[in-house]
Image (cartoon, grey):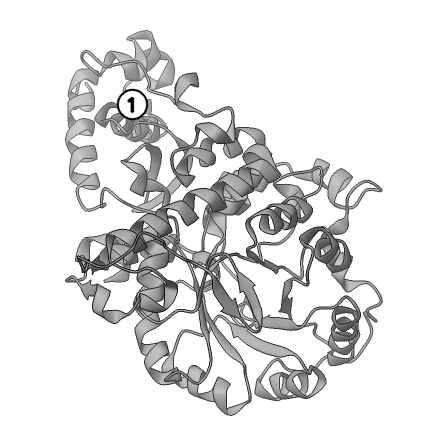
Amino acid sequence: MPPLFSLAQWAQHAHKLTLSSTTAIPARLSSELSTGGRHNVAIEKNRCIFPRIMHITKAQCRREFLKFMAGSPVIASLGGMAAFLAEGGIDAQEPNAPAQQTAAPSDVISDPSQALDVFDFEEPAHRRMLPGHWAHLVGGVDGDATVRANREGFNHFYLRPRRLRDVSKVNMKTMIFGTTYDSPLFTCPTGAQRNVWLPDGELSVSRAAKARNAMQMLGSTASESVEDCCAALGRPVVQQIYAPAAFSNCQILLKRLEAAGVTTIVLTVDAAGGRNAETEDRLRPKDVSSCSQCHQGPNGGNAHIMDKGFNPKAPRMPFDWTYVDQMRQAWKGKFGLKGILTVEDTSLSIQHGIDFIHVSNHGGRATETFRSTIATLPEIVKEVNGRVPVFLDGGVRRGTDVFKALALGATAVGMGRPVLWGLGAFGQPGVDKVLEIVDRELRITMGSNGCAKIADINADHIGTLEWPDAILPREAH
């Protein structure tokens, strides 16, 4: 029986299907895609992953679709892959197909001084990091909708500049719990940073934060100790904590932090249910047997450096508000909760004596909420009503993003992935440049909007656009 279609007809059909299947997918799919569409997007079941910086072409979309079709029984009926390739394969089905576009060497920076924005650090970091570590960094959960929403959320708000104000001197200094920082921007508590920059991980971030006089929020899964990071920073870090299952171990940790000079802690509350890291599972190498040589060997294995002294057999305790109350009683310094996304939990937090609220969805890595943190912020600020400071992270890439968060009521604004891009690409100089770039953008944004100091930034400087329905995948509707 002759085949229903010739190879050329299959190519034409695939082209039509590819175009129709991609029209529902928005152009700006993630924080990373906001750089002008310079990313190669692999599309599968309406999910998008963004492993490397490239130009997107229709030819590439057709190639991906045809690669998928090549494994189908229909291709087998045409004579199989051998016959398919004998006629030129995928390339032969694409008339005047251009050569695959990759990031040219001149497009990838080789020194931090060459960066114009934080996105310039992503591809250098990608090229230097091990594939499994990169897979862990880029993905979210499920279909990554919340990762994309975090970035797109900032486009929901526009700025309302005020003119004829004296902005000859712009002062971004911010005081948080008695410490004055040069800017409200802080580094988020991303853990195990030796996976990103092997020589000294978090210590490079500490030194960069010291140079920029910025707040460092240190992860409790850090690969460097809190003592060493405080020494490198020149002052105490703000310590993030994942609750130990046994509260007796939590007490051990709190005593260690107190001895290290830490005065502010923040408890992450959004990781108790586990996570479906689908993108990470798709991107990471299938064989990870060699990973134990670093993660558990004599020269690595620092992922549990903050767990030292814990009793693994200590009785477990449910992670609930009773656990928070016991931490509140045991810790005399400032105590915040990270991962609060609802008015109800904001109210409960204040009732339980919490000193600050950290609006965060774990960079889209905890729960597939389909909502950005910047969209959540106004209702949290309204509920707080000035009683405690509010921190925010999630999708922050620009000085305008920081400005918008401050205008909506945030006290401090955190960056996660861009800091890791800078770290993975160049170590401390990369982190320093990332912070410098966003601080410079914030300074420009403040001046162009008539704000000479942080206190001048308020809700009068911001407006709301209609929410773009297209930013979420079909599964969200």
Q: Quadrant of residue 103?
A: top left
Q: Residues within 10 Å of mark 1 (few under 14, many from 20)?
A: few
**Quadrant for the N terminus in the image:** top left
Above or below residue 418? Residue 191 is below
**Quadrant for the C terminus in the image:** bottom left
* Residue 471 in the image, given as x and y percentages of width and height: 24, 53
Above or below residue 312? Residue 326 is below
Q: Quadrant of residue 379?
A: bottom left
* Residue 404 in the image, given as x and y percentages of width and height: 31, 61
* Residue 380 in the image, given as x and y percentages of width and height: 36, 77
Q: Residue furthest bottom?
A: 351
Q: Label 1 amino acid?
A: Ser
- Between 307 and 328, the one lying in front of the other is 328
Residue where numbered disc 1 is placed = 77
Above or below residue 248? Residue 49 is above
Q: Secondary structure at mark 1?
A: helix
> Quick check: 133 left or right of 456?
right
